[in-house]
Image (cartoon, rainbow, N blue to C red):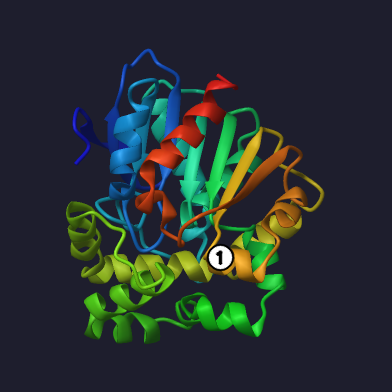
Amino acid sequence: MFEGFETQMIAGAGADIFTRIGGDPSAPPVLLLHGYPQTSAMWDRIAVDLAQDFRVVCTDLRGYGQSEKPKSAPDHAPYSKRAMAADMVAVMAALEHERFCVGAHDRGGRVAHRLGLDHVGVVQAMTILDIAPTREMYANTTDAFARAYWHWFYLIQEHPFPEQMIGLDPDAFWTKKCIGLGGGKHPFSKAAKAEYMEAFRKESVIHASCEDYRAAATIDIAHDDADEGRKLTMPLEVYWAKNGVVDRCFDPLALWRLRAERVSGEALPGSHYFAEETPEVFAQKFRAHFQKHV
């Protein structure tokens, strides 16, 4: 995977972050953020494509993959999207990128949202895949959403209940979650899936990812409430899966317009993992959007 890329472990703002880097060092920088329960491996084909025109940085979020899993706290602050976003700004600064574009999927999109709010002026343009804002998704939860996104409500249960249950058979849990939201398909490359499964078998990753979700249901919403009225100011494109849960249960454009000043986007064919199903489509979407704003 990631032909032509190098890897580094870079100090974030409280966790060491595993980072893949490729493309011309003098080219405009792009940061790509993955979702749950994955790693930066999801971006392999998109990243290699984008590296023709950009300096591409793909990270494992804190708690995921090969990145550090810091100890959590009763308020889950170490796994807040604020903490994760601060890691990303620190990584990019260490690579001498003070301003950059962001492409993000799933949990990474939630980190990107907080990054844009907490670090005004840093993000030149942003593309977020297959989510609506966290607070609004919780606030607008329906029976259909809760049944489809059952893991949102399972993972936030008090430690150690979900960790112990997942740890009994992490492969089965991973498969039910990912193949389920993939519409029964297997969109992952063999190499990427092997990396995902290897990481998710670790107790530290299972616990950290539960803390990510616990933070989302508590401190992340508190941060959003404190920011009431503030919106993302950079150009934001959002895409969601035409055959996915977000499309069935929400109006993503309407919800993002509550949180961002300049929003465009549409539903595209595929499941939740459509970035891996059709990487050429998203490489083209990212390239077109980012080249307008660098």
Label 1 sits on a secondary structure element that is helix
Callout 1 amino acid? Ala
Q: In this view, does 259 lie above or below 90?
A: below
Which residue appears at 33% of the width and 31% of the height? 49
The image shows residue 178 at horizontal and vertical percentages of 36, 69
Q: In this view, does 138 lie above or below 160?
A: above
Which residue appears at 64% of the width and 44% of the height? 265
In the displayed structure image, the side of residue 4 where residue 276 appears, left or right: right
The image shows residue 109 at horizontal and vertical percentages of 52, 50
Q: Residue 30: which quarter of the image?
A: top left
The image shows residue 133 at horizontal and vertical percentages of 64, 57
Q: Residue 2: which quarter of the image?
A: top left
Depth check, front residue: 207 or 48: 48
Which residue appears at 36% of the width and 33% of the height? 57
Which residue appears at 30% of the width and 36% of the height? 10
Residue assigned mark 1: 216
Depth check, front residue: 96 or 278: 278
The C terminus sits in image quarter: top right
In the displayed structure image, the side of residue 11 where residue 260 appears, left or right: right
Q: Which residue lies furthest to the top in this view?
A: 26
In the displayed structure image, the side of residue 113 where residue 222 appears, left or right: right
Residue 1 showing in the rendered view? yes
Depth check, front residue: 109 or 72: 109
Q: Is residue 220 above or below residue 94?
A: below
The N terminus sits in image quarter: top left
Q: Which residue lies furthest to the right in this view?
A: 229
The image shows residue 135 at horizontal and vertical percentages of 67, 64
